[in-house]
Amino acid sequence: MRKIRILLPAMMLMLFLGSNVFAKGYRIVLPAEKGDTAEYLLSGWKWGDKVALDTVMASKGKISFRGKSDLECGSYEISELSGRKLVEFIVPRENRNFGITFQKEGEGYTVKRGNAENRLFSGFLYFLDYGWEGLGSAEEFARKIEEFRNRAATELPGTITDIILGNTLFTPESAEELRESFPFGDTIILNTQFAEDKVEQYLGLLQYNNNDTIIKYVDSLISCGGNRELQSRLAHTAYDFFYNSSIMGQEGVAVHIAQNWFLNDLLEWPDAEGKFMLRTFVEFNRHSLIGMDAPELGLTDTLGKKVPLRSLDAEYTIVYFYTDDCVSCRKETPKLVDFVNGYDQGVLAVYAVYADGNEQRWKEYINSNLYIYNPFMEWVNVYDPEYESGFQMLYNVIKTPQMFLLDKEKKIIGRGLDVKALAELLAAKNAERDRTRELIETFFAPLAGDTLQIYNGIDMFYNSSKGDTGMMKEFMQELYNTLGRSEDYTLQQGAVYVAKKYMLGMPDFWSAEFLEKRKEDVRIFNMNRLGSVAADLDLERADGSSLGLFDVTTDYKVLYFYRPNCGVCAEVTPKMAAIYNEFKEKIDIEIFAINLGKGYEEWINYFSTIGADWENVRGTDGDSSEIYRRYHLQNIPAIYLLKGNVVVAKNINDNELKNILNNITQ
């Protein structure tokens, strides 16, 4: 069969094929002054950056831009080469064969021919530049703006014009409100001048949350992007924002974005050199972020001994990296020395790492500059001459000085500090600690003596804070510390309850070193506990004769541990002698005045002036180590009361002892 070719006229063919034959390109025309031959620039916006697209010369009273390729949907402007802007316009989503013509109106331009989106947008811009001048009040201005916004929302929903007008004079009160009002996931925002600003505004509203919360919302923001390009822009903007944040610790958010979006190639970083720097930033920061366990260091002290960072036992530990020839260190190190010498808010430790390898210069610098006299301060000088520990990468020691603050668990709570910031952070932490302690003391003081109620109170504190792991741990530590320092034995038992149930019983929440210390604390507490038989002691009198604690069979025994050179003991010892002289005729009692000092002559001279015929004894051969081991004496003087050989009171003061004895004799 013969095939028949049918030739359609050109117009019929165009109608048959429809829009597929429409030409691509754009045409933009502005009027110019007659005789104007200046050059003009067409620019488009790309995520807040203005990009030059085309230049033309004015000719025959017109500034005319023509292009064969479609412009992308977005915001554009025409300006003189000097930079003076003439007009802004929008290429809509339906951007095929885009055309717009402007007409001169007064000092500005309005749309003569163009789509509805640009007609409304042009009218809005003209009002902002010139139209408002005839208005009588700010309220009238606001009403006019609202009219434009309402028109955009009803006539042009979802367009760039709607987005721009909807956010004009709109100040969100929260990140959630901004997230709901602005289409962060719509690719229409890529080619605009306002998208990056809106992202930064959103991040600014997020930044005062904790890092975990910020990361959750930032990940959600990046994930909402309509394509990989938009996601990359969102992620890059968020990374830069938190990388440059002035809020301590928010570099951790930047590290998260780098690791979870760029370094795993989920999204593209703009350039190879930048990605190398990104990887370097992560490697030098990922080990020592706020909230992390501080990397262990076991560096060498001035005697050649390895000192582990975690061997320092203090409420707070400062890790300080410095050199002797660093200009900034020469300013900061003396400030740190002055600060720690004057610190009186608790026990503080400094792990001072000399970041150079010259042993002689290091020791000379210590002798000349690092004089520490605060008795509540432990300053440890260490260095790593062969750089074997990798402290530079573990602690981001790219330059010196570098300072970190660790809590009692050796968790990082401050980084990148100077002495001023350190002082402010410690002041804030101590104020928070003091408020918590006051709350605990006020709550538990009425419960003293009622063990069950104390335990129930501790459980209540746990249940009220368990939803936030950080808060729970802070409460449990303060409960443990505050109750453990109490003079009431039942409250001390509460501290042991905290240690057993909420620390040793929940090992996943605490570091191994912290748990080992709590095990030891519990063991020590259970030594000579109330109601238990006291640990026996082998003692000797001044004449060298031996005396065992259990050799004396009086109804009551008082163990008074002291040192002759102890200032507090000098005040307490005469009071203890008076108590003994008062009660020795009333009840069957003996006081063991147990000397923990080493000098024999000093001991003899001391008790000869006391005026009490009690048992003056010390450790065998003057060695007190066994006494300390069996009674773990942390504070001197210390007083125990035994009934027979059973402990009925421990770590009491002289007034409490007298009150107890008064009750016994009544």
Image (cartoon, rainbow, N blue to C red):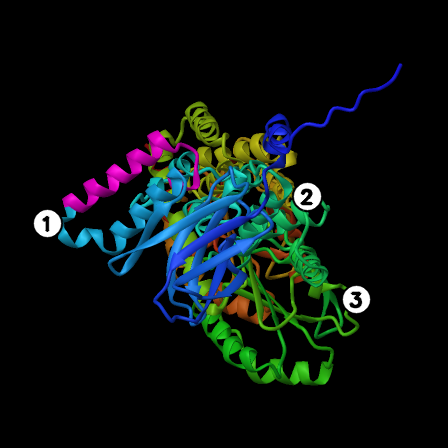
Q: Residue placed at 43% from the left, 52% from the top?
A: 429
View extreme (left): residue? 136
Give the residue type at disc 2: Ala
Looking at this view, is 512 or 386 the one in front?
A: 386
Q: Earlier in the sequence, mark 3 or mark 1?
A: 1
View extreme (right): residue? 1
Give the residue type at disc 3: Glu
- Residue 153 in sight from this viewpoint: yes
Tell which tag, 2 or 3, sits nearer the viewer.
Answer: 3
Going by the image, does 250 lie left or right of 387? left
Magenta segment = 139-164
Give the residue type at disc 1: Gly
Would you name the residue on which mark 1 appears? 136
Q: Label 3 vs label 1: CA separation?
A: 75 Å
Task: Check residue 388 in the rendering and tell me which mark sits there, or answer none.
Answer: 3
Q: Is 153 inside the magenta-drawn segment? A: yes
Q: Residue placed at 38% from the left, 36% from the top?
A: 177
Would you name the residue on which mark 2 appears? 512
Q: Earlier in the sequence, mark 2 or mark 3?
A: 3
View extreme (top): residue? 1
Circle 3 residues within 10 Å: few <14, some 14–19, many ≥20: few
Where disc 1 sits, the SS reads loop
Where disc 2 sits, the SS reads helix
Q: Quadrant of the C terminus?
A: top left
Q: Overall secondary structure of the magenta stretch?
A: helix
Tell which tag, 1 or 2, sits nearer the viewer.
Answer: 1
Circle 2 residues within 10 Å: few <14, some 14–19, many ≥20: few
Looking at this view, is 427 or 184 the one in front?
A: 184
Where residue 395 sits, quadrant-wise, is bottom right
Marks 1,2: beta carbons within 8 A: no
